[in-house]
Image: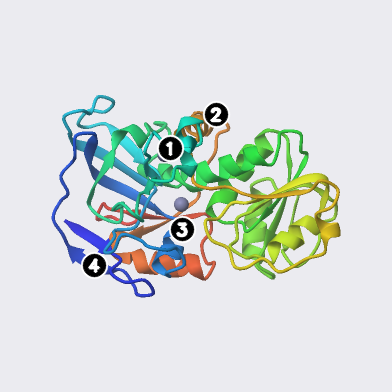
Amino acid sequence: MRAMVLEAPGQPLCAREVPVPRPGPNQVLIRVRACGVCRTDLHIVDGELPRPSLPVIPGHEIVGTVVQKGEHVQGFSAGDRIGVPWLGATCGRCPYCQRGQENLCDEARFTGYTLDGGYAEYTVADQRYCFRLPTVYSDTEAAPLLCAGLIGYRSYQMVGEHIERLGIYGFGAAAHLVAQVAVHEGKRIYAFTRPGDTPAQEFARQLGATWAGDSTGLPPEKLDGAIIFAPVGSLVPAALSATTKGAIVVCAGIHMSDIPSFAYRLLWGERVVRSVANLTRRDGEEFLAIAPKVPVRTEVCIFTLGQANEALGCLRRGELRGAAVLTMSDQRGR
Ligand SMILES: [Zn+2]
Ligand SMILES: [Zn+2]
């Protein structure tokens, strides 16, 4: 099969012919139809996350069709559409797993990082961690729901239900999905982008943001909570400065540049800074049930498998509107 492989961090992915993997007892073999390109992929390729299982095939927003199943697989059959997320396996025994925090499992394995992912024509996945996908979404539309959507949704839940004014720092794939859920629930969205990124600000307004502006400035009103999707540590004190007392500032990315020191008064007033790590299967089930009801619409920029490096480059440079998705069909676009 064709695959785009990370052989060494800091280098472009290599187009390779590799054997089609065989499913283990709890795994399904999947013919990949589409795979989203997440900022985490960029962190892996750039060597910002430790110890990937090299060589590794990135990609953890996989939509495909089951073509073969292992002997213990019961949840899916050949021909079923399936979604594979970032959380690929957990131990089920550690204290985190036992208390419903499988996202924090000490021995968790992650798709496209410590397990091969979806930048390929085929992949295998443990079906116990996979999802059925709402039928209203095409393969390319469904792909970004699997990480951008899930992580966005988990982050949104961490900000607290009571909030009215929600700040979102970095208006990319995750932000554009969670903003739709928040607007649907009557929240007012304040979108912050790289300074001068007027297309992203316009995009945020089109999706219902009350206000959109540069991340270096303050919003016209204080925020009740904020989610930081951009991997920029200086946004933590910036977001704290923009919030009311009691606000929660959620850092949603897996990697962030160092957070500069800041005055204690920014944290005073029971403000909270917290991170969100990975996802649980429950997040996935909840979000995939909510998404078609809102309905969350995914805005995608489509690339072919062979254009994976180009897609990562566009993401790095902030040139995408919505989410990048690789399609494995020969035809580009829909
Ligand atoms: Zn565990
Ligand atoms: Zn991701």
How much space separates mark 4 and mark 1, taking CA atoms?
Answer: 38 Å
Amino acid at circle 3: Thr
Residue 40: mark in rendering = 3
Q: Earlier in the sequence, mark 3 or mark 4?
A: 4
Q: Is residue 130 visible?
A: no
Q: Amino acid at mark 1?
A: Cys
- Mark found first going from the N terminus, 1 or 2: 1
The structure residue drawn at horizontal position 68% and vertical position 45%, both measured from the top left corner, is 208
Label 3: how many Cα within 10 Å (few below 14, some 14–19, many 20+):
many
| Quadrant location, ligand no. 1 | top left
Closer to the eye: label 4 or 2: 4
x%, y% of residue 264?
Answer: 83, 60
Q: Are marks 3 and 4 in contact (CB under 8 Å)?
A: no
Give the residue type that dot 2 points to.
Answer: Lys
Task: Tell whether circle 3 marks a residue whose Cβ is less than 8 angstroms from ligand 2.
Answer: yes
Nearest to viewer (mark 4 / mark 1): 1
Q: Return the residue at label 4.
A: 15
Separation of residues labelled 1 and 2 (CA atoms): 35 Å
| Above or below for 200 versus 174 | below
Instruction: Please give the label number shown on residue 94.
Output: 1
Q: Tag 2, which secondary structure?
A: loop
Name the residue carrying label 2: 293
Alpha carbon of mark 3 to alpha carbon of mark 4: how far?
20 Å
| Disc 1 residue: CB within 8 Å of ligand 1 | yes
Q: Residue at x 26, y 28 (%)?
A: 76
Instruction: Please provide percent x and percent y for residue 275.
Output: 61, 50
Q: Secondary structure at mark 1?
A: loop
Vertical order, 273 against 142 (above or below): below
Whichever of labels 2 and 3 marks the residue nearer the N terminus, that label is 3
- First in sequence, mark 4 or 2: give its number: 4
Can you give x and y, in whole percent of width and height, for residue 195 in the image?
A: 69, 70
